[in-house]
Image (cartoon, rainbow, N blue to C red):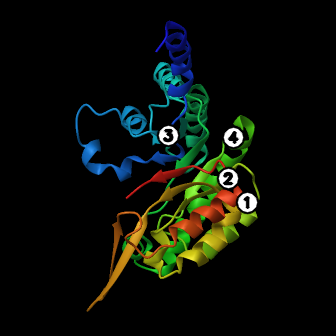
Amino acid sequence: MTRRNLLIAAAALPELSQTPTLRNLGGAPAGFPIRSKTKPFDFVEHCHSLGLGVVESRIDPKDLDAARALRKKTEAYGMRLILDFRLPRDPGDVPAFETALNAAHEAGVMGLHTAMTGRRYEIYPTLAAFKKDFEQHQKTIALVEPLLRKHKIKLGIENHKGWRSAEQAAWLKRVSSEWVGVHFDFGNNLALCEMPMETLANLRPYVISCHIKDMAMQVYDDGFLLSEVPLGDGLLDLKGMVESLQAKDPNMPFNLEM
């Protein structure tokens, strides 16, 4: 290699380092449970080491220096960032959420993620309890939507085994805001006995980000067993689902969570 070629190659290195190998594939902390228990563990660094272009994380909303440092790191790596903050339950919690949105700005987020429910079949003893909790979730989003619109930050609400997809879609249609959408989990609604493509069809108009995974099922005496499995080993039409979402948004982030 000549000196001239060496200098040209060296000049290209910073640009190459800012282009993740897998630009639209990312990592969610729940997808790396063993790694996450290791101390110290820098999740952004780990995702970057895998060539991922998106990372989902949490920060202290009051620590703006940490938010700025996180932005500096993700931008240097050419990565996009999704954050998860506690949402307000009543008007008294709203100022704290606006503080979190300010931190999100400093961190340079592409959007927020939230999982508002647990597993419907485990946490609600009665239909009335489910309805009461659903009403609270709707009140929460009514509180945050004006702030999301003000700060121009999108929130993706995960289908987290709490609502059937038709229920969630009907709710978001009522909200009718470009700042409130779905963080689509590929497999969660199987636990509610939905067909995966039905879930996708119902929620697709509102999807802004994803948790990608594959699922396997097995019948046993008391019902069925459901588990996440390596991509391609399960029953989901991953290729078809990814293509459908990429047709909606070519920059759709798919965060591995399994």
Q: Would residue 39 be found to the left or right of residue 258 on screen?
A: left
Q: CA distance from mark 1 to mark 2?
A: 8 Å
From the image, tell me which residue sits under label 1: 175
Q: CA distance from mark 4 to mark 1?
A: 14 Å
- Residue 220 is situated, as x and y percent measured from the top left of the image, at 27, 89
Q: Along the line of sight, which residue is nearer the eye, 247 or 36?
A: 247
The amino acid type found where label 4 is placed reads: Leu
Q: CA distance from mark 1 to mark 3?
A: 37 Å
The amino acid type found where label 1 is placed reads: Val
* Mark toward the start of the polypeptide (1 vs 3): 3
From the image, tell me which residue sits under label 3: 21
Label 4: few (<14), some or many (≥20) within 10 Å? some
Can the viewer see residue 239? yes
From the image, tell me which residue sits under label 4: 147
Name the image quarter holding the C terminus.
bottom left
Can the viewer see residue 167? no
The residue shown at (40%, 77%) is 125
* Mark toward the start of the polypeptide (4 vs 3): 3
Q: Are marks 1 and 2 in contact (CB under 8 Å)?
A: yes
Which image quadrant for residue 4? Answer: top right
Q: Residue furthest bottom?
A: 221
Q: Secondary structure at mark 3?
A: loop
